[in-house]
Amino acid sequence: MHPNRSGVHFLSSYPVIRSLIRSSGVGPGDLVIDFGAGPGTITAPLAAAGPRVLAIERDDRFVRELHRRFAAQPSVRIVHADLRTVPLPSRDFSVVASIPYAVSTLLVRRLLSRPRRSLVGADLVVEWGFARRIAAGDTKETASWARRFDIRVARRIPASCFRPAPRVDSAHLVIRRR
Ligand SMILES: C[S@@+](CC[C@H](N)C(=O)[O-])C[C@H]1O[C@@H](n2cnc3c(N)ncnc32)[C@H](O)[C@@H]1O
């Protein structure tokens, strides 16, 4: 698929992908969600670490590609859904994902504002300024998240780590249940 036609910025740095997965600590027996899985850039190395993976994607073309790519891997479940409304697991789960900038606030709010604390941790690629705002904990909402989760920016991810490169840098945002 041609990246410019799809309008999607694919993570193209394997060291960055590896460090997201290593940071998450997920392995056999864990359940992990890749929100906005695209063609499976993160899904594939994530599955190789041994957890059960839910690859959630809205775009029909990516969903077809994901089904082809992971047909022989029962540990990967492809979910054709909108991440804004897809039901979240009631059992403990982690998230490792490069999420669409346009719905970052909504998704982080969905993950962190749930009364049931089944989110164990998340390693997210998000826009740099957004990551700084979430980690600052200086609004009523982010402060309430900070009481229940440890939230920090692990590192800046230059725009050159994506194809095509977006206009702004990103960040690896780390979230852990307290
Ligand atoms: C930044 S790209 C990441 C793609 C891939 N994970 C990667 O790292 O290269 C975001 C992905 O989220 C998908 N997406 C956008 N909005 C979505 C939504 N509301 N629900 C589910 N997927 C969505 C896009 O189709 C795209 O594949």
Image (spheres, grey):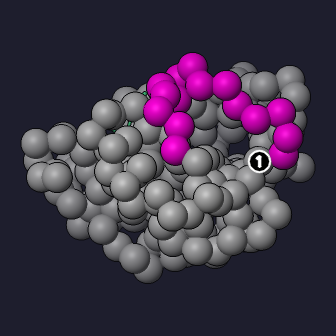
Left or right of 15, for residue 149: right
Please say whether residue 133 is one of the residues in the magenta stretch.
no
Amino acid type, callout 1: Phe
In the depicted structure, whether residue 2 falls above or below residue 41: above
Between 44 and 73, the one nearer to me in the picture: 73
Residue at image x 78%, y 25%?
114
Q: Outermost residue, bottom direction?
A: 15
Determine the secondary structure under disc 1: strand
Q: Is residue 118 above or below residue 175?
A: above
Q: State the residue lying farthest toward the front.
A: 72
Percent of width and height locating residue 18: 52, 76
Quadrant observed for ligand 1 in the rendered image: top left
Q: Which residue is mark 1?
A: 93
Q: Is residue 155 visible?
A: no
- Mark 1 is surrounded, within 10 Å at the Cα level, by few (under 14), some (14 to 19) or many (20 or more) other residues, namely many
Give residue 158's position: percent from left, percent from top.
Answer: 32, 65
Q: Is residue 81 left or right of residue 116?
A: left
- Could you tell me residue 52's position as x and y percent? 69, 57
* Residue at image coords 40%, 31%: 58
Name the one closer to the observer, 51 or 36. 51
Q: Position of residue 175 (x, y in %)?
A: 70, 51
Q: Is residue 87 magenta?
A: yes
The residue sitting at 40% across, 76% down in the picture is: 14
Q: Which residues are magenta?
A: 78-92
